[in-house]
Each structure stands twice: as structure tokens, then as C-alpha cells.
Amino acid sequence: MIIKPVPCLQDNYSYILLDEKSKLAAVVDPVEPSNILIALEEYPDYRLTTVLTTHHHWDHAGGNNELKKQRPGLTVYGGSKEVEGVTSVIDIEQPLELGSLRIQPYLTRGHTMDHVCYYVQQQQQQQDDNQQQQQQQSGAVFTGDCLFSSGCGRFFEGTPTDMDNALTKLKHLPENTDIYFGHEYTAANCKFALTVEPDNTHLQQKLEWARSAGCTTPSTVLNESLTVRAKKK
Ligand SMILES: [Zn+2]
């Protein structure tokens, strides 16, 4: 699996997700379709079939109709009919497929009531001596405006309990899962988090790094567990 961040608007991230086996491509929150189509020119062998929308806000879903116009036949996933251009509403956590990639949607309410995170894993058949076994590689999760790096989204529609339930789902993913979030807020989030946990050395180091790095996506579940204050469950 290949994942490429595509910066959009002021501080948004869209993402390209590629399955190297089937040469199928998906995009996450393609708010500026022209940026996505330019980025896809680097991968002429791939066929774009799928849009994964994290939630209905315009700075995530607002490019869906334009992209559908430019690439007719796209399947557009989202958590409600409020999502622009949606063709398939996710209302249960039923896995999706993109070629050899398994995509597990998680309903993650809080920021909006239709927020969905998408956890992606590649499943490979590997020949090991005479035994064929299925090996699961480490995965990636697209978290939109639910979880950023060292912070979470505002509760526009849901309650703190909704957000707590959502973050708990993400927290239980394997520690080496890469987290691809929807906005570059990392330095500001670390600065705020340090007002709550001034002695957290992981946070201090991350703030320094985030200020110099500019682009901080992806994070990991392990990194977030060290730099986001959360209840143990
Ligand atoms: Zn939002």
C-alpha cells in the first residue's frame, strides 16, 4: 500500500491511497480535486475508483461532486446523506475493499455525528516453506477531524462521551498503526497540551520537531498515546 498526503486549502490534508497489487486508487477527503488529479499523474498505471469521506464539512467533502464530474463512476463513501456526492452511506462498520486492501470503517462521532475513520490493512498471501499463511502488515488509519496529532476535533455535533468512545476505538488499534489526520495543527496542539502536562518530555520534543518539520503527517498510535492526555480504559 502506498499513501501520499496532498496538502489542500490552508492546512488541510487529502490523501491518495494506492493498492500496488490491483492498481486501484482511492482518495480521502479530496476537497481540491485539481490537486488530487495532479498528484495522481505520478501514478498513471492506477485507476481511481473510490472516495473515502471522513465527514460532511465542506473542507473535507466539498470537492466530491467536482471530482465525480471529472472522473465519472466513482464510489463515494461517507457517514450520512449530508456528505456531498455520497453514493454509499456507511451506517454499520462493515469492511470495504480496495483490491487487496481491507478498509475497516469506524463510526467516530463527536466532531460531527456522521464522522467516519477508515482503518486500512494489506493482506498478503506469503509462501513460507510449504505452508501458506496469511500475514497482516501494519495498517494505517485516516482520522479526518476526529483525531489530529496531539489533539482532537471540536465537538460541533456530538458530546464528550461520543468523542471519548471514538478515541477509544482508535486507541485500541495496533501501536504501529500510522495515523493520517485531516489538518496540520500539530505544533499548536502540542503548545496547548503542554499547558496541561508541562513536564511531558515527549510533548516538549514533539513541539520542537513539529515547528521545524512543517508537515507532520503521519503520526502513530504509539506516538499519540504518549502525547495525548487520555483516560486509561
Ligand atoms: Zn470538520
Image (tube, rainbow, N blue to C red):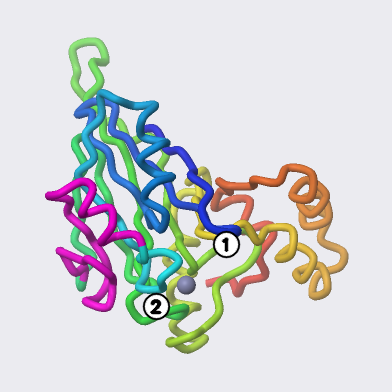
Q: Is residue 206 above or below residue 99?
A: below
Q: Is residue 73 left or right of residue 116?
A: left
Front-lying residue, 204 or 132: 204
SS for dot 1? strand
Q: Residue at x 48, y 44 (%)?
A: 6
Please give the label number shown on residue 119: none
**Looking at this rendering, what residue extends furthest in the right direction?**
199
Residue that numbered label 1 is attached to: 148
Check disc 1 and give the amino acid type: Phe
Q: Report the magenta residues as a range.
A: 63-90
Q: Quadrant of residue 154?
A: bottom right
Front-lying residue, 60 or 109: 60
Q: Is residue 59 left or right of residue 118?
A: right
**190 falls in the magenta region:** no
| Total tally of numbered discs in the picture | 2
Residue that numbered label 2 is attached to: 109
Horizontal and vertical percent position of residue 216: 64, 47
Crowd tier of the residue under label 2, counting other residues whose Cα lies within 10 Å: few below 14, some 14–19, many 20 or above: many
Between the C-alphas of marks 1 and 2, the distance is 15 Å
Crowd tier of the residue under label 1, counting other residues whose Cα lies within 10 Å: few below 14, some 14–19, many 20 or above: many
SS for dot 2? loop
User: On the rendered image, what quadrant is the N terminus found in?
Assistant: top left
Q: Residue at x 33, y 76 (%)?
A: 114
Horizontal and vertical percent position of residue 96: 19, 52
Does the Cβ of the disc 2 residue fall within 8 Å of ligand 1? no
